[in-house]
Every structure is written in structure tokens, then in C-alpha cells.
Image (cartoon, rainbow, N blue to C red):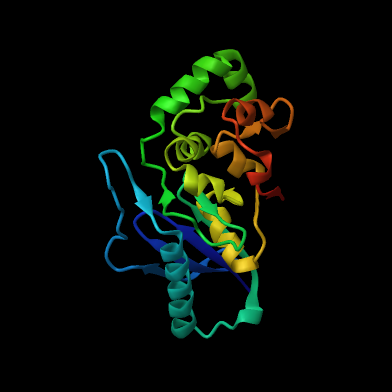
Amino acid sequence: MYFLGIDVGSSSVKVALVEVESGKNHAIVQVPEEEMPMHSVHKGWAEQDPEAWWHLVCEGIAKLKTGTAVSSDQIRGIGISYQMHGLVVVDENGMPLRPSIIWCDSRAVEIGKQAYADLGPDYCDTHLLNAPGNFTASKLKWLQLHEPGVYARIHKMMLPGDYIAYRLSGAINTTISGLSEGILWDFKNERVSRELLMHYAMDPGMIPDLV
């Protein structure tokens, strides 16, 4: 029996088969062979197409299938790791509304700095355990300010790993660790940070179900 591991990076996607009993790596592929493109319309911006990640995941799994004798009924579970702090926004049909603003994009730095000053160091440091900074929530605020037409059509926001899990399962959800990396989780009250959402004037309904 095997686990299927998927790693969605900003330069490539890796897919691996790991033996359940031994933990040994049985097979691994990396796609594409050359580095995945990153789009930068302006200085400090970095975007990638979530659909491109998904196609590469499918390509990687297909390559594993042709290179091994492992069948689908031998897969016990799937694990996903991914580039952190990115933002994916989808409409009511689950379709991405724009390219993902990925981890190394710095357009929301000033938004995060202002939020830290407005919410106060005490709240941010003790509830969020970090400054809003250039993380996912601040990138979503940037969309609200600069692409209101796109923002108005958002059904759910997701982290990159959430999007791949959604494409595999058909369910849009997230985790505490995902919300934490987006600086959306209140550790003191063990819930989504209502204070941050209120400060950014964001609809809590955009946050996926927690699993």
C-alpha cells in the first residue's frame, strides 16, 4: 500500500509514491522539466495560474502511473504540501477569477503594515501571532481595493493547497494551519479572526469551511 504525496511549488510540482509500512520513497516525478513560469506585470508582483498547477499535478500522476505497477486501489491516502501565503479566489462555480497572487508577491506590504498599526501590536502578536504583513489576508484586501470587479465575484478564497485539494475532492475547505499562514486565525479565541475581517471589511462567508 502507498501514500501519494503532492508538492505544489512555485518552480515545479513533485508527485511521489511512499510505501505505507516502510515510509520509503517508491517513485517520484517532477514536472515541468524546466522551471514553471511566474508572471510579473509590475515590479514586485508575482502570479501563477492555479489551473496550471492542477494540470501539472495530473501530468505528474499520469507519469507515475506509467512508470510503476501501482494501481489506484493501492493508494491509502493523499498528502498535499504547497507554496505558502498565496491567494486563490474562485467564483460560485469554483473557477479561478484571476491568477494566484503567490508568496513572493510584495504588492500588499503597505496594507499589512497599516493593519498592524491599526489593530495594534498587542492584538496581532497575541491573537494572530504575527503581523498581517504581506500574507494572504492582505493580498485579498489588495484585490478589494484595486480590482473591485473581481472582488465582487468572489465566492471563496483559498490557499494554493486548498485549491488542489478542491480539484481532487470537489469540496472547498481549509485548515487551521492554512488560515494561520494567511494571518486569518485567532489563536487566543480559536476561531477565524473577526477583528481582522472587520478591519479589512471582508465577508466571513468568503472563508472556506474548516476541516
Q: Quadrant of residue 184?
A: top right
Relative to residue 55, is residue 71 drawn left or right? right
Q: Quadrant of the N terminus?
A: bottom right
Can I make out residue 182 in this image? yes
Q: Quadrant of residue 129?
A: top right
Relative to residue 30, is residue 126 drawn left or right? right
What residue is rendered at 63% in x and 19% in y? 126
Task: Say which of 30 and 97 sits in front.
Answer: 97
* Residue that protrudes farthest toward the front in the picture: 149
What residue is rendered at 60% in x and 67% in y? 168
Percent across and percent down for residue 177 are 61, 42
What residue is rendered at 61% in x and 65% in y? 78
Relative to residue 168, is residue 36 drawn left or right? left
What residue is rendered at 29% in x and 38% in y? 44
Relative to 35, residue 210 above or below: above
Percent across and percent down for residue 210 are 71, 47
- Total marks placed: 0
Can I make out residue 87 in this image? no
Relative to 203, residue 111 above or below: above
Percent across and percent down for residue 85 are 48, 42
Percent across and percent down for residue 132 are 51, 28
Task: Say which of 152 and 161 sits in front.
Answer: 152
Task: Say which of 27 and 206 sits in front.
Answer: 206
